[in-house]
Amino acid sequence: MRSSSSWRCQLSRAMRLALRWCRRRRPQRGAPGARLLELWSYGALLLKSLYSNSLSDGDTLLDCAFEPVYWIVDNVTRWFGAVFVCLVVLLTTSVVVIVYLFVLPTIISTYPSYWVAWHLSCGHWLLVMVVFHYYKVTTTSPGHSPKDKIHIPSVSICKKCITPKPPRTHHCSICNTCVLKMDHHCPWVNNCVGHFNHRYFFCFCLYMTLGCFYCSMSSKTLFLEAYDAIEVSIYCRFYQTPGPTETFPETTAQKSIIFLWVLTSTVCVALGGLTLWHMIIISRGETSVERHINNKETRRLREKGKVFKNPYHHGPMNNWKLLLGVEKRSHWFTRVLLPSSHLPDGDGIMWDFSFARSDPMAI
Ligand SMILES: [Zn+2]
Ligand SMILES: [Zn+2]
């Protein structure tokens, strides 16, 4: 009995296996078509998921399409951050060396003593301010949203850090963390510009622009002379006529002066434009990120017949005092015109609003 039941059992098992094999084989007969259909429905589902959300729009779609490009840019910026910092240090050092070797000796031998004193004080003051603020902006953390505290005033949750986002906080995809009062990620300082280093960044831009302007103006006469000399030597070489004989140190000095003038003039114009832009947005109580958000909000509310007000705008002068940490009149000298490591006002998490919460505001 046992053997016949075992035989039946084996048979029914074999039949079940055969049926299962047949069922599996059936869709494979039309495999390419089924596979295509499956791919099509998967693609359609993916496409629908891009605009199925009521909050999704063209910007979201563009963001998704450009995601690989953002990934490449973020990674390249992260990897080349140290290279950019080395470049800034190298170029600044080369400018300082050229000024010490060629510009200052000419100033000392040409100008009266009071002009020499002015040049020495102004040049060294700018150099100290540039070096101090660059060192501070690269080494000071911009401030991050606390990961261990849950009960903090927040406006949303960061989808990448899964932590509460306090007002004015934004996620930096290069640093891969949330930054308090984020302005932007600067590859030239290899750091994010945020609540705790915003002042250092602005002062660095300002003093670097002034320093480049100073170098450019101081070396203008020397540059014109060097340019003329090089032009004459090229002309003589081209027409094979005997020109003025110049030694190797003289040619090196001429080329160095031209390099100095071109570099400092270019940086002065480019960085001057950036500094001016930052001066405008600081006067409005905004960061670079908030400028875009506030513009969008202004347009959105205008369509509804409402006026947008920036809750962090306390008046141009107060905005400057808040950024620079000026609490009394003497601070303009001790904290702005001299190197100062004082901390900014507030912790970057709690913010004073310039008006009631019931008004529309940017987050
Ligand atoms: Zn984040
Ligand atoms: Zn960053």
Image (cartoon, rainbow, N blue to C red):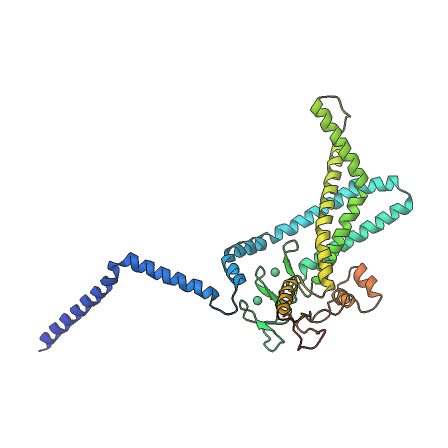
Residue 88 lies left or right of residue 34; in this view the side is right
**Which percent across, then down, holds residue 350?**
67, 74
**Which percent across, then down, holds residue 115?**
89, 46
Closer-to-camera residue (160/48) = 48
Q: Is residue 144 visible?
A: no
Q: Residue furthest top?
A: 241
Point out the quarter of the image occupied by ligand 1.
bottom right
Vertical order, 317 against 96 (above or below):
below
Q: Quadrant of the C terminus?
A: bottom right
**Which percent across, then down, holds residue 252?**
73, 35
* Residue appearing at x 83%, y 40% in the figure: 105
- What is the quadrant of residue 94 in the picture? top right
Residue 270 lies left or right of residue 326; in this view the side is left
* Residue appearing at x 24%, y 64% in the figure: 24
Closer-to-camera residue (91/275) = 275
Q: Is residue 206 visible?
A: yes
Closer-to-camera residue (116/36) = 36
- What is the quadrant of residue 103 in the picture? top right
